[in-house]
Each structure stands twice: as structure tokens, then as C-alpha cells.
């Protein structure tokens, strides 16, 4: 991997992890464009760890409160929201990978994300804070997060939309979504840690030490600013502009996949 490729992939991951346009879909797209095929899953997890650091920095007060007082309702809601995500990943990850892997149907999944965002943008802001969520609410949000294991289906888009649909106010919908990303990203690390330990995936050999470090830093920095930007966007109720973007991108990719064969191989 070239350094400029690592910078671009890091920037794309950091930006799109928190903007509701699907980081996985954009990484698949750019990896196809660059012709990168080795250790892509492990490098993706590395970039996700970088964006996890961005969450810790932005929401450090919330995370510190959870550490100091772990037995609180927010902790319970994060756990229950994570359960369906884990179950979906364990039961269906291989199936989804075989059906949708290597960029197959990625255009359609982008359009699905756009439809979800368009629906969310029509929702009036509710009044629920995180502490007011029911366990059923958190299970609904976690289930939608699980669906986002599909490439080009946005995790943040699904969780924010589901939170708004369950009556949360916009600021807390974003907060719950980003806090819920912590166990989701850690879970993704667990799914690939075995391959890294057994030597089936060696990042420094397949990617290179310098590109790995630079990609990591780029993802962390861009992820932090993406969170700040996204929180303001959600407060102002302007998710429809992201839906327009993924509608256009998805349509272009569908056209390419079935007719042009220039981007999606």
C-alpha cells in the first residue's frame, strides 16, 4: 500500500464512519479503485480502532461517567443495544459476506441507506433522552445496527434513524449512536483477532508499517471532526442531503456494475 492510499483510506474511514453514508461501502469502493486486496479486513479494523479513539475523545465525559459508575441505566441500554448486533454478526456475517462481498450489490445498499435517512429526516424530534429509552427501544436500535454489517449500509445512519423513530431528541440520538459504536467496533476487532494472532493476517507485511501508522492517525483526526460536524447536522435536521448523496452514488454504482464495469469489478 502506498502512503497516499493509506491517507485517503484513513480519511475516508474517519469521515464516513460518523457521517451516515457507510464507511464500509466507501472503503470497499476505494479498495476496488486502488486494487488493494490483501489484509483489507484487518486494515479496516485498524482504521475502526482509530475512529474509536475519536469517540473516546469527543465523548470522554460520558465514557468517564460510565467507568466511574458502571451500574447505571445507560450501561444497561448500551449492553441491550449491542446484543442483537452481536447475534446478527455471528449468525449472518458469513452469509452476508458470500452474498454481498467484494462490492456486489453495493449500489443497492447505498440506496437503502438513503431511504432510511430520508425517513429519519421526516421525523420530528422527540423528547426522550438516553435514560428514557426502554429496553425494547435499545433492542430496535441494536437490530438496525446489526443490519449495517452489510457493506454500504451506514451504521450511524441506521442507529440514528432508529433512535429518532423511537422518540429520542436529535442530540441524544447522535450521542447514543456514537456510544453504541464502541462495543460494535470492539466486537469487529474480536472477529478478526484470531486471524491476526495465528499469522493469517500480518498487517506490517501486507500493508507496511508507515502506511499503517499514517492511515491510523488520519482516521482518528478526521473521525473526531466528523463527529463534531455530524452532531450539528443532526441537531439541525438536515439528513436529507446525505440521502441525496448516497442516492446518486448508489445509482452510479448500479449503472457501473451492470453496464460500464469500470468501478465495481
Image: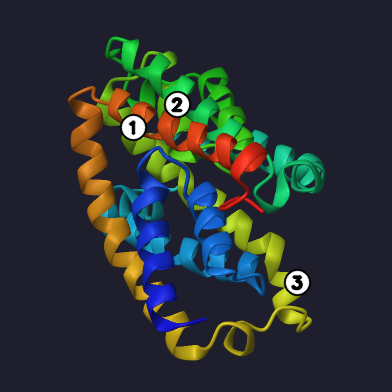
Q: Residues within 10 Å of mark 2 (few under 14, many from 20)?
A: many
Q: Identify the mark nearer the N-term, 3 or 1.
A: 3
Q: Is residue 128 left or right of residue 199?
A: left
Q: Is residue 80 at least partly visible in the picture? A: no
For residue 114, the mark is 2
Residue placed most toward the observer, 98 or 70: 98
Q: Quadrant of residue 8?
A: bottom left
**Is 119 on the left or on the right of 64, as rendered?**
right
Which residue sits at x=24%, y=25%? 238
Q: Which residue is mark 3?
A: 194
Taking 41 as reference, is 153 above or below it? above
Q: Secondary structure at mark 1?
A: helix
* Residue count near mark 3 (Cα–Cα under 10 Å), binned few <14, some 14–19, many ≥20: few
Q: Earlier in the sequence, mark 1 or mark 2?
A: 2
Q: What's the coloring here?
A: rainbow
Q: Residue at x 63, y 90 (%)?
A: 205
- Please rate how many residues cluster around mark 1, counting C-alpha atoms within 10 Å: few if below 14, some from 14 to 19, many from 20: some
Q: Spot the residue most to the front.
A: 260
**Residue 33: x, y in percent?**
53, 62
- In this figure, which residue is indicated by the disc labeled 1? 242
> Mark 1 and mark 2: span between their CA atoms?
7 Å
Asked if disc 3 and disc 1 are in contact, CB closer than 8 Å, the reply is: no
Measuring 59% from the left and 44% from the top, which residue is drawn there? 260
Secondary structure under the numbered disc 2 in the rendered image: helix
Quadrant hosting residue 191: bottom right
Marks 3 and 2, the one that precedes in the sequence: 2
Q: Is residue 202 visible?
A: yes
Asked if marks 1 and 2 touch (Cβ < 8 Å), the reply is: yes
Disc number for residue 46: none
Amino acid at each position: 500500500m502506498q502512503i497516499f492510499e493509506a491517507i485517503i483510506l484513513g480519511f475516508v474511514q474517519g469521515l464516513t464512519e460518523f457521517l451516515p453514508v457507510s464507511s464500509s461501502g466507501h472503503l470497499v469502493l476505494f479498495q476496488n479503485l486502488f486494487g488493494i486486496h490483501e489484509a483489507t479486513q484487518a486494515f479496516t479494523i485498524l482504521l475502526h480502532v482509530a475512529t474509536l479513539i475519536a469517540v473516546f475523545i469527543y465523548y470522554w465525559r460520558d465514557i468517564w461517567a460510565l467507568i466511574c459508575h458502571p451500574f447505571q441505566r445507560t450501561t444497561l441500554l448500551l449492553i441491550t443495544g449491542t446484543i442483537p448486533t452481536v447475534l446478527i454478526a455471528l449468525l449472518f456475517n458469513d452469509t452476508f459476506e458470500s452474498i454481498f462481498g467484494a462490492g456486489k450489490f453495493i449500489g443497492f445498499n447505498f440506496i437503502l441507506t438513503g431511504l432510511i435517512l430520508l425517513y429519519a429526516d421526516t421525523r420530528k424530534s422527540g423528547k426522550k433522552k438516553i435514560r428514557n429509552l426502554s429496553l425494547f427501544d435499545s433492542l430496535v436500535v441494536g437490530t438496525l445496527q446489526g443490519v449495517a454489517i452489510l457493506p454500504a449500509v451506514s451504521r450511524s445512519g441506521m442507529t440514528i434513524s432508529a433512535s429518532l423513530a423511537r422518540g429520542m431528541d436529535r442530540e441524544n440520538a447522535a450521542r447514543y449512536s456514537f456510544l453504541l459504536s464502541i462495543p460494535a467496533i470492539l466486537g469487529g476487532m474480536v472477529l478478526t483477532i484470531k486471524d491476526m494472532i495465528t499469522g493469517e493476517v500480518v498487517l506490517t507485511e501486507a500493508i507496511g508499517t508507515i502506511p499503517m501508522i499514517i492511515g491510523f492517525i488520519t482516521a482518528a483526526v478526521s473521525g473526531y471532526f466528523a463527529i463534531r460536524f455530524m452532531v450539528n447536522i443532526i441537531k439541525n435536521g438536515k439528513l436529507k442531503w446525505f440521502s441525496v448523496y448516497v442516492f446518486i452514488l448508489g445509482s452510479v454504482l448500479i449503472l457501473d456494475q451492470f453496464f460500464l464495469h469500470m468501478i465495481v469489478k
